[in-house]
């Protein structure tokens, strides 16, 4: 049986940022230190199918802004309080914690929760990548509701949301804002048998392997990864919008990259919270739900869309999403149209 | 109209024609625009492209125009469908990248300011009925020409404004520039680089796509060489970095590997090389790259590493779009953005300089005389264009004839004006000297007046005898008569200048001395008071006409009233004939008085005349039929009367007196 102990934590943390932004932020360092402090002897990692089928599993994630996490420090009990609140509402103890996604802080917070609660961490997550909305998960695709959802804020607040699945995001965002910009959310309560059905499996072990020094970056991409181009950012433009009225946390923008070699194509990366569409000389070459990210040529860190600046040398990579995202339902939830691009 | 249209009038309009002189006038065009437009398609979503036929002008609206990514995708799809052009509403933030992509792919991208739907309707009507569109242009030109009125400069201004991309010049009958764009002079400039601006090679879509994520585009459109977006495998093979020459008909060799080539690896390696080999339309990368780098820190950061041609051109224009580098960056951006623009203008100008003469029309005055030629040159952007240009030039002939007529009328009304012009022409310096502009204006007026300004000319002078018939009765002294002389000369000799010279009126004509003398004889007859005329020798040009005028003056002086003397035919007889015999007869009588007093029978005068005429007494004796001693005796008597025949001055005076006395009065 796998476990994440102090040594594995370092590999896990390294693996969690291979295709995730914000690895250089203080919030990530904070989450890393936090996890180090609570990890103790280690957190067991279990497959969902190995649990008692009726056992309650809870997804834990950071909700809101990671920047806010770095500025308003946590008390340390937020993950535990959020899960306990959900347990009180459901009248059942959580038998395991699962991640919503495994990008940087969001990989570490569930680990911290599992350590604090003394329960195992499920080997898997709800996206296989990162999406901006809480409801953009394979759990939702599997028919599991994010609600009831418990939020624990840094000042001891506790909020329980109970609503229709498609209203969760609408309610969550203002509440998180009033909690100080971030909170730990415990959500998607479900039985282990359901989790086994909807989880993107094996991603925790994958990150542990990918985070091993010397492992190739592609090891962190379970369904394949390819390099779209290497080039230099020529321009970052505000995009004139992608059509639909969208409730996404950030403004659309457009990043132009000139391929440095080969055909010297003009690559346009349309970003809305994340890069959702890549055009090469006007032809679509990659798009959501696959994950498109820019890796800085110097340092090898993922470049945040907001931090992209002209002159940066980047490698544009496309991480293939889990097959479930390429189903009709998956595309509706996490495909281009979910980001307002009518393609 | 009953007149049949010249061939080509119905040829499909090209994009450039629409932009330069059609419904897209004023729009910004990126790309060559040499594609004919057969129809129009309004596209509000990319799916519509599947049914876009070749030679379609695609008008983007709504979501399809909403943002740089949408326009870029549309440009790409339009290229795949062999559309004629993409028309997008301006104002988007990404015109720069759209322009780069359009030039990369060799498709024309047009940004319009107005409502794209209105544009679409206009383009559709122009494409459906190219004849109507061209007629509309011709009609508009007719209206503008009518508004311009009789002025050569304004007429040429209208022509060059309404026929952009085409240079129109008005040359006089000697081929010298009068008005319009000098670029239009036909010159043996080297031919433009042909279709080099339409890259023979299109970039392939590059690294292939995973099978499951392949977005649309499907298989090619039946033109094997068309690259296909979305390969069947996820290996990253370039599915078709092929050439597009098949459908553009461009003359460039197909550099890119055909999609039939085998071996994904070889394609990947050869396609970029092929792309490098194609001259980029924006000119050498170093130029635009430099333009970007000049502009300050931000531009420099992006432009400095530009090495290859492609990278250079692109990074030169790119920092523009960034606009994030503060002031310096902003400037850098502008510079960069302009660089390709400049490149395009230069390209077009180069094409015009080398461009063939599209049309040439002779301009005749209202009296049928040739004023000059209108010459239009530029690149022929469609089969129909030269015919349209010819029609428009034809429209300009009447206003130019009217301009000439107006100028002539003005000059004929005002002797002083045309005389001043003539003086200006006589004194006109070399180009580059002070007063060059005024000289040019005088030359322009001379064209209107139909005056000869080049080639061999002959000077003339008309000299009146006696007192003016109605001196001072009207206006300043002699003004009426001068105007009268000018009118008579112009009526008989033709359109030539008339200027005052002493008592008479001088001028020059392109006629040879013989014909000019003939015409002047009729002038002399027509003038109200007795006149004579002199005609100078023929000289090589206007700069030597002063010499010819001197001869004309001499001729006129020796001519008796009612006659015309040609300087090139003038001899001693004419000089003698010009002596004012009447006036000199009395002094001659005084000189001869002592002789006549002793010469009872006139034999002494007869002998003196004979001796002086023959230059010696021997031959004088022969002429008189007397013995030479008789002559010697008579000469003794003449000396005795007080004449010193050894003195040359006395001899000349006596000879003249004899001539006058013996001449018939």
Image: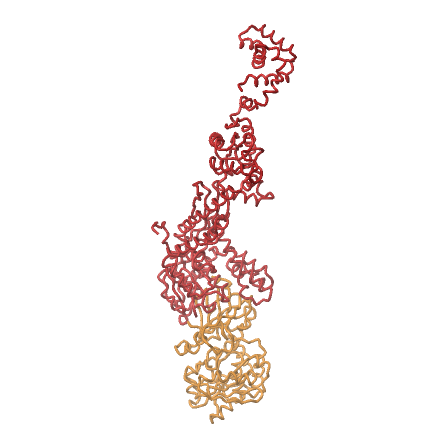
Task: Provide residue A13's location: percent of width, then percent of height.
Answer: 54, 79
Q: Quadrant of residue B663?
A: top right
Q: Foreground: A91 or B499?
A: B499
Q: Foreground: A273 or B361?
A: B361
Residue at point 64% right, 18% down? B649
Q: Is residue A105 visible?
A: yes
Task: Provide residue A145's location: percent of width, then percent of height.
Answer: 44, 86
Residue at point 55% right, 26% down? B558
| Chain letter matching colour orange | A
Q: Is residue B361 above or below residue B213?
A: above
Q: Foreground: B300 or B588?
A: B588
Residue at point 57% right, 86% down? A154
Q: Quadrant of the C terminus of chain B?
A: top right
> In the rendering, what colour is chain B?
red
Q: Is residue A228 above or below residue B193?
A: below
Task: Provide residue A138's location: percent of width, then percent of height.
Answer: 43, 81
């Amino acid at each position: 049986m796998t476990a994440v102990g102090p040594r594995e934590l370092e590999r896990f943390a390294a693996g969690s940022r291979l295709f995730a932004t914000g690895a250089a932020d203080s919030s990530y360092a904070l989450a890393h230190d936090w996890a180090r402090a609570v990890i103790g002897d280690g957190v067991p990692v279990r497959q969902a199918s190995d649990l008692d089928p009726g056992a309650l599993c809870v997804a834990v994630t950071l909700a809101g802004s990671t920047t806010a996490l770095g500025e308003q420090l946590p008390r340390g009990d937020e993950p535990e309080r959020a899960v306990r609140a959900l347990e009180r509402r459901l009248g059942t103890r959580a038998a395991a914690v699962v991640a919503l996604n495994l990008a940087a802080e969001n990989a570490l917070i569930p680990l911290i929760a599992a350590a604090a609660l003394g329960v195992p961490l499920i080997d898997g997550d709800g996206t296989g990548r990162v999406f901006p909305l809480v409801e953009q998960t394979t759990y939702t695709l599997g028919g599991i509701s994010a609600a009831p959802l418990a939020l624990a804020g840094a000042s001891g607040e506790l909020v329980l949301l109970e609503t229709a699945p498609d209203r969760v995001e609408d309610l969550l965002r203002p509440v998180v804002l009033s909690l100080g910009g971030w909170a730990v959310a415990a959500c998607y309560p479900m039985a282990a048998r359901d989790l086994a059905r909807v989880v993107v499996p094996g991603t925790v072990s994958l990150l542990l392997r990918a985070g091993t020094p010397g492992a190739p970056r592609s090891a962190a991409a379970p369904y394949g990864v390819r390099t779209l181009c290497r080039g230099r950012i020529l321009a970052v433009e505000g995009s004139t919008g992608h059509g639909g009225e969208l409730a996404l946390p950030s403004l659309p923008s457009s990043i132009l990259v000139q391929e440095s070699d080969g055909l010297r194509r003009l690559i346009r990366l349309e970003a809305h919270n994340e890069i959702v569409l890549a055009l090469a000389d006007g032809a679509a070459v990659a798009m959501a739900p696959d994950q498109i990210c820019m890796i800085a040529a110097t340092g090898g860190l993922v470049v945040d869309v907001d931090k992209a600046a002209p002159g940066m040398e980047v490698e544009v990579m496309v991480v293939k999403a889990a097959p479930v995202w390429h189903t009709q339902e998956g595309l509706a939830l996490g495909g281009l149209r979910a980001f307002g691009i009518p393609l | 109209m009953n007149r049949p249209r010249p061939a080509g009038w119905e040829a499909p309009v090209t994009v450039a024609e629409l932009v330069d002189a059609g419904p897209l006038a004023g729009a910004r065009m990126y790309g060559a625009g040499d594609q004919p437009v057969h129809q129009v398609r309004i596209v509000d979503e990319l799916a519509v492209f599947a049914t876009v036929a070749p030679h379609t002008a695609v008008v983007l609206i709504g979501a399809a125009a909403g943002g740089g990514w949408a326009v870029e995708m549309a440009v790409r799809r339009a290229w795949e469908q062999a559309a004629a052009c993409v028309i997008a509403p301006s104002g988007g933030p990404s015109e720069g990248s759209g322009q780069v992509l359009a030039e990369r792919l060799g498709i024309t991208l047009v940004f319009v300011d107005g409502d794209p739907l209105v544009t679409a309707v206009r383009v559709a009507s122009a494409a459906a009925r190219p004849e109507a569109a061209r007629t509309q242009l011709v009609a508009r030109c007719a209206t503008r020409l009518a508004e311009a009125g009789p002025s050569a400069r304004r007429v040429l201004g209208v022509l060059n404004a309404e026929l952009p991309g085409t240079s129109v010049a008005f040359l006089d009958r000697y081929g010298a520039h009068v008005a319009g764009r000098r670029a239009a002079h036909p010159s043996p400039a080297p031919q433009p680089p042909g279709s080099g601006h339409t890259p023979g090679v299109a970039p392939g879509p590059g690294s292939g796509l995973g099978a499951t994520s392949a977005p649309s585009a499907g298989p090619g459109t039946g033109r094997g060489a068309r690259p296909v977006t979305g390969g069947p495998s996820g290996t990253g093979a370039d599915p078709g970095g092929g050439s597009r020459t098949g459908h553009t008909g461009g003359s460039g060799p197909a550099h890119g590997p055909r999609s039939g080539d085998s071996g994904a690896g070889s394609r990947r390696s050869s396609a970029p090389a092929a792309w490098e080999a194609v001259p980029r339309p924006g000119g050498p990368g170093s130029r635009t790259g430099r333009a970007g780098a000049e502009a300050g820190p931000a531009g420099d950061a992006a432009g400095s590493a530009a090495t290859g041609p492609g990278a250079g051109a692109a990074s030169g224009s790119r920092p523009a779009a960034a606009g994030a580098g503060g002031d310096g960056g902003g400037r850098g951006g502008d510079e960069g953005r302009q660089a390709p623009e400049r490149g395009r203008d230069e390209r077009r100008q180069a094409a015009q300089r080398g461009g063939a003469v599209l049309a040439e029309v002779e301009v005749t005055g209202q009296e049928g005389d040739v004023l000059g030629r209108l010459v239009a040159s530029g690149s022929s952007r469609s089969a129909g264009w030269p015919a349209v240009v010819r029609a428009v030039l034809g429209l300009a002939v009447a206003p130019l004839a009217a301009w000439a007529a107006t100028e002539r009328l003005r000059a004929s009304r005002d002797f002083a004006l045309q005389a001043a012009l003539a003086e200006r022409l006589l004194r006109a310096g070399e180009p580059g000297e002070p007063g060059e502009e005024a000289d040019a204006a005088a030359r322009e007026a001379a064209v209107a007046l139909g005056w000869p300004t080049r080639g061999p000319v002959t000077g003339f002078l008309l000299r009146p005898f006696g007192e003016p018939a109605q001196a001072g009765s009207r206006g300043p002294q002699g003004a009426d008569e001068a105007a009268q002389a000018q009118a008579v000369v112009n009526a008989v000799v033709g359109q030539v200048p008339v200027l005052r010279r002493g008592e008479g009126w001088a001028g020059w004509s392109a006629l040879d001395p013989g014909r000019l003398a003939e015409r002047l004889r009729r002038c002399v007859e027509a003038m109200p008071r007795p006149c004579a005329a002199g005609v100078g020798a023929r000289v090589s040009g206007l700069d030597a006409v002063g010499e010819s005028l001197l001869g004309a003056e001499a001729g006129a002086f020796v001519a008796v009233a009612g006659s015309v003397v040609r300087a090139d035919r003038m001899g001693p007889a004419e000089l003698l004939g010009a002596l004012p015999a009447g006036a000199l007869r009395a002094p001659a009588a005084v000189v001869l008085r002592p002789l006549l007093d002793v010469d009872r029978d006139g034999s002494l005068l007869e002998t003196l005349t004979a001796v002086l005429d023959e230059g010696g007494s021997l031959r004088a004796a022969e002429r008189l039929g007397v013995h030479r001693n008789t002559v010697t005796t008579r000469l003794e008597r003449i000396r005795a009367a007080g004449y010193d025949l050894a003195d040359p001055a006395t001899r000349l005076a006596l000879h003249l007196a004899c001539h006058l006395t013996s001449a018939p009065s």
